[in-house]
Amino acid sequence: MKKLCTVAVFAIFCLSSTLSYAQFGIDSARERTRDRVFELDTAEVPSEEVQVIDLSVSADFDQPYGNHEHQKLDIYLPDEREVVGEGSPTLIFIHGGGFTRGDKSEGEGLASYLSDKGVAVVSANYRLAPEASWPSGAEDIASLIQWAHRNSQKYSLDAGRIILMGHSAGADHVASYVFYEEHQLYDDGVVGAILFSGGSYELSLSINNEGTGLASEGDEQYFSSDVSSYDSKSALRALEGRTLPLLIGYAEGDPASIQLQNFALIDALYQRDQKLPSVIQGIGEDHRSLLNHIELEAESAVAQQIVSFVNAQ
C-alpha cells in the first residue's frame, strides 16, 4: 500500500522572487460576474429528453455533450443511489495526453473505485490540439457541467455537488476553468477541484531555451507560440477571483518540469491564502501510475485521500 505524504515544500518559496502575483481579494472577481451566465449556443447542443432515473443502469458510454466528435463522455453510477433527494456527488474527470491525445477510458479505474464509494463519475473526451486551442478545454468543461445539470434527474446526480478532476493536461484544463472566471458558468454547482500532475500552470516556466515558444510541442500547439500571450493564459495569473477547495497531487517520479509547476502552484496558493493547500505526493509513483494504480490498490492512501476530499465537499 502506498504511503501518503502531505508535503510542506520549503523549497517552493524561492519561486516567489521570479513570479509576481497581485493582491488576492477573496471572491472579488466572482462579485463582478454575479449577473453573468456563460451560455452555450443551444443550436450546438444535442437535444436530450429528461428521463426518470433507471436504477438498473450502472453506466452509460459515449454520451454526447456537444456536436464535435470528441465531445463524448462515459458516466459511471453507484449501485445504490437515491430515487429522491439530492442524488450522488458527481466527479467530472478530464484525462491527460499533452493536449493532443488521450482518451476518457483513462478514468475507468478511478470511476470503478469511486462509484463503489457512492460517487458518480463522468469521464470525458474533449477537443484536442492543434485543431482546438486555449481556452477550448475550459469551454468543454463548462459544457460538461451543463450536461450534468440537464441530466441530473435522469442519473440521480447532485448537480450542486460537482467536483472537477484532471490529470496532466487535464489538470491544466481544470485549472483554466477553476481560476478564470470568464470561462465559468454562474451557479455551476462546482464545490471543489482535484489537480493531479498538471504541467502548464505557469507558462513562463515552460519556455524553451531559445525563448521563442514552449518547450513541449503539444503545449505550444494548444497555447500558441506567441510568448507575449503566456501571462494571460497561465492559470497562476488568475487566482484573484473565485476560491474553491483544492487537492493538489503529483508523483514522486513526475518529471522535474511537472514538479516545478506544482511547487509554483502550491506557492501561489500559499501567498493568496496564507496557508498551504491540501497536497498529496504519490510515493513510489510515476506520472502515469499515480492515477492508474487506484483501482488495483484501492485502499492506497492516494485513493483514500481522493474519497475523503470528495466527501468533505
Image: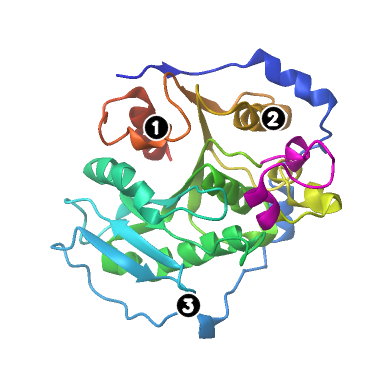
Q: Quadrant of the N terminus?
A: top left
In the rendered structure, are the residues bearing label 2 and label 1 in contact, judged by CB atoms less than 8 Å apart?
no
| Magenta segment includes 155 | no
Position of residue 98 relative to residue 9, above or below, is below
The residue at which mark 1 appears reads as: 289
Badge 2 or badge 1: first in the primary sequence: 2
Q: Nearer the viewer, residue 248 or 273?
A: 248
- Mark 1: amino acid: Ser
State the SS at label 3: loop
Residue 211 occupies quadrant? top right
State the SS at label 1: helix
Residue depicted at x 57% and y 53%? 99
- Neighbours of disc 2 within 10 Å: few (<14), some (14-19), many (20+): many
Q: Residue furthest bottom?
A: 43
- Mark 3: amino acid: Asn
Magenta part of the protein: which range? 201-222
Q: Position of residue 76 (x, y in %)?
A: 27, 55
The residue at which mark 3 appears reads as: 67
The residue at which mark 2 appears reads as: 264
- Mark 2: amino acid: Ala
Q: What label sits on residue 203 in the rendered view?
A: none
For the residues marked 2 and 1, what is the alpha-carbon distance in whole angstroms? 23 Å
For the residues marked 3 and 2, what is the alpha-carbon distance in whole angstroms? 36 Å
Badge 3 or badge 2: first in the primary sequence: 3
| Magenta segment includes 208 | yes
Position of residue 53 relative to residue 242, above or below, is below
Q: Nearer the viewer, residue 210 or 258?
A: 210
